């Protein structure tokens, strides 16, 4: 292929492929065409120019980060209520605010602001679950982000569904709208939790997901009282319940999993269940620490997520990586677990596997072109002995310079090209003023 | 006082004073003259212009962050060796690198790069302990940073002292040089640890510190085997040993304290010992978690520190605050401990109390003018309900826009005014190339 045929060529810097051989290429040339990585070579092998050239001198080039779990519109509640017990936080602050302020406009505007934050900190793909999920999909198309949008189900009235009997109708409508609309958007279904969805709801939704060949997500064992609650309701442990219902398979994503025991992990490994790990949120809510090193040893596929901004309070995957590595070292008193390379893999190829998006997560010829450039010419990133260590333990979201999603440049030299960031902030500030007024 | 007499006036934004009343002033006017905060008022009370005006619209104005413990030149080893056990890391990587590469030039150049990183992430004061500590003082004067520079003592040969019998001579020389040289620089003494300094060394150094009226620092109970080591050597617990030696008083700073028990904490409270908490380093090295919430309840004065960049791997106090808050919540399973305001206090007024620098840590008339402006006009800082939450859980080092130390602007709109940052990076890269060569 002639380089003149490429839409974009990236030259220079250092490429972290994150492929199975963990290849690192100095002074690479990466050609992008029709949304795909057309070629990965070195300066000597590939010559000529494409329509657009990106100079990556002084940068690390790597796959875009994959955020496997978030509730984007909750940026509107960022910092509204903190340092509270989970029940106080949810029942006295978040649920009332949601009941009062969640609508299609809030979801769309909140999601767009969240996407600005995510692109600015290196995320190219996210998996979201919230109300009015179609608005998230619309915002993602606007922002040019890759997304798994998960329609939520819960057995009590929500801002977007007052009647649980409408679950399957909603599921069908959501699928019809999104299943083939955009190559960047993948629909999924999300049952809130084993204590808030009946076995009937969970099996029906999982069955619908299975028929459509899409992912099924569920919050699982976030807190240490969930096992007791489910035991009282059904006489079983949560993982046992889901397994008996036939819900656990390779397209099931269990979110949090802070309190899984050895038996639960064995079930996950046997069924191929995927795990979304959200350390910052679970730390801030004092929910617990998921035994990720143990799960990785069992071969369970894990990815990282930020959770919503009301419990984090940002959507910054660089911070999530740093904290994930350090949290597990100190809680196991073993500094060798969750090394930097492992953690970076969780945030890239691991996340893509969790979400079933096999075309992203590494930089290899033929894959979708989701690529970020991290500017390493900064005091806190100097000197550079080890790319993985530097990215996980020292780099920050603000070091991401340029971002490409599906072959389209969405940020160049820190300038967002798809989102009017001042407008996105202004919209959410207006909403926040209403929320603040009500709170007084 | 007429505003025309001021050197600098800061107008607009929101002021977090961090004073005892935790006053927050909207649209403030802050006058600075001769290195001091000359006045704190509001737009209506204070009119006119000073020689220099800083527009703080959209910013939070707050005291500069105080890093109570670091080893600055270790930025030269950032990422050289990670994810290793403490003994492997120290004995096979850090100590050999230090023995081979630490000299006055490395200390000076490393410290200057570290100061660039610190100013860029909001730190205005640090407390350092390393070899050739006078070079750190010289770099701090160059950078215009406020510093406690602690001459180190250890009972084996070091790059700057091959003979432990020279301890007191070195101490005297260091004091003579620094005690009255610069209002920004305060000397101190640092005994490495109870297992690496003899009781004779510790008492002699503490006695010299006491005579000079300066702080005495010591690494204490960083790892869980230290108590056993000291018990074997002296038949006492480490804190008991130090207390019996008469070393513990209000000018003693105990660093780390991950394994203090209730008895130790009671001794700290009784003696007025100060504590430097370095959560990220202790997490990364899997050293342990200091019981900071319990110490705060006992009224023990605590501050935050980053430790050196070889075990963190940055010097970013914003990241340290976020992680400190979250770590203690999850390890105590109590989301209400270490709330955002408490943590921000640790990083400002708490740190100033730990270091005995009573003239910094808050923004009040008459105090030294150590002030930072944090630009809140960013997606990840929108909306803004609660300043403390936003600063601790969402703000990043790169959000710091402007920094003033001792009434002098050291960074304006992210541009460092006292350090040639490209040169500082280039110098350390040259050194790193040597280290890399040797390692192969």
Image: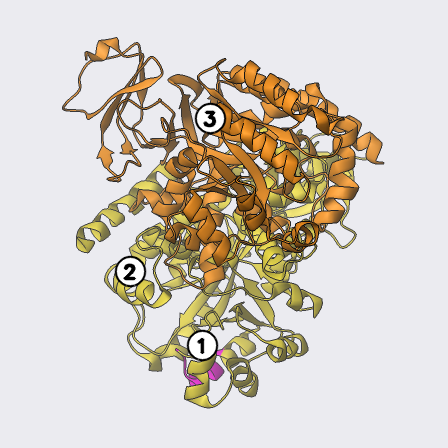
Chain colours: A yellow, B orange
Along the horizontal axis of the image, is A144 left or right of B100?
A: left
Q: The magenta stretch spans which residues?
A: A196-205
Which chain is home to disc 1? A
| SS at mark 1 in the image | helix
Q: Main secondary structure of the magenta part?
A: helix
Q: Is residue A65 visible?
A: no
Q: Which residue is mark 3?
A: B213
| SS at mark 2 in the image | loop
Which chain is home to disc 3? B
Q: Which residue is mark 1?
A: A226
Which chain is home to disc 2? A
Q: Quadrant of the C terminus of chain B?
A: top right
Q: Which mark is residue B147?
A: none
Report the residue at 79% width, 42% height from top.
B92
CA neighbours of label 1 inside 10 A, class few (<14), some (14 to 19), many (20+): some
CA neighbours of label 2 inside 10 A, class few (<14), some (14 to 19), many (20+): some
Name the mark nearer the viewer: 1 or 2: 1
Up-down relation of residue B307 to residue A368 (above or below):
above
Q: Nearer the viewer, residue A185 or A322?
A: A322
**Tag 3–tag 1 contact (CB < 8 Å):** no
Q: Which residue is mark 2?
A: A103
Report the residue at 31% width, 68% height from top.
A160
């Amino acid at each position: 292929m002639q380089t003149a045929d490429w839409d974009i060529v990236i030259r220079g810097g250092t490429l972290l492929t994150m492929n199975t051989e963990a290849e690192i290429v100095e002074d690479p040339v990466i050609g992008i065409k029709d949304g795909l990585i057309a070629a990965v070579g070195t300066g000597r092998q590939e010559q000529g120019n494409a329509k657009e050239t990106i100079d990556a001198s002084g940068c690390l080039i790597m796959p875009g980060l994959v955020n496997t779990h978030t509730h984007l519109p909750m940026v509107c509640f960022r910092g509204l209520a903190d340092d509270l017990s989970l029940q106080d936080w949810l029942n006295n602050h978040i649920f009332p605010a949601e009941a009062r302020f969640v609508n299609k406009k809030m979801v769309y505007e909140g999601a767009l602001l969240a996407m600005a934050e995510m692109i600015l900190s290196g995320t190219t793909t996210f998996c979201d679950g919230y109300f009015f999920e179609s608005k998230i999909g619309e915002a993602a198309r606007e922002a040019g982000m890759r997304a798994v949008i998960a329609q939520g189900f819960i057995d009590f009235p929500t801002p977007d569904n007052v009647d649980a009997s409408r679950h399957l109708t909603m599921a069908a409508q959501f699928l019809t709208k999104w299943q083939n609309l955009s190559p960047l958007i993948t629909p999924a279904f999300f049952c809130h939790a084993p204590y808030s969805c009946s076995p009937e709801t969970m099996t029906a939704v999982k069955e619908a997901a299975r028929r459509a060949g899409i992912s099924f997500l569920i919050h699982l064992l976030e807190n240490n009282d969930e096992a007791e609650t489910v035991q009282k309701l059904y006489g079983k442990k949560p993982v046992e319940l889901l397994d008996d219902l036939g819900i656990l398979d390779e397209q099931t994503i269990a979110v949090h999993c802070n309190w899984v025991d050895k038996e639960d992990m064995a079930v996950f490994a046997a069924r191929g269940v995927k795990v979304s790990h959200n350390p910052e949120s679970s730390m801030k809510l004092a929910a617990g620490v998921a035994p990720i090193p143990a799960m990785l040893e069992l071969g369970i596929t894990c990815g990282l997520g930020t959770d919503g901004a009301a419990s984090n309070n940002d959507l910054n995957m660089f911070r999530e990586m740093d904290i994930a590595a350090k949290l597990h070292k100190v809680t196991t008193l073993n500094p060798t677990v969750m090394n930097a390379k492992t953690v970076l893999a969780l945030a890239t190829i691991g996340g893509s596997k969790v979400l079933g998006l096999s075309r992203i997560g590494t930089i290899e010829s033929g894959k979708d072109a989701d690529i970020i450039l991290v500017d390493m010419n900064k005091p806190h990133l100097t000197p550079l002995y080890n790319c993985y260590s530097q990215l996980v333990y020292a780099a920050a979201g603000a070091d991401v310079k340029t971002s490409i999603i599906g072959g389209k440049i969405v940020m160049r030299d820190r300038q967002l090209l798809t989102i009017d960031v001042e407008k996105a902030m202004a919209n959410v500030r207006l909403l926040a003023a209403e929320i603040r007024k009500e709170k007084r």
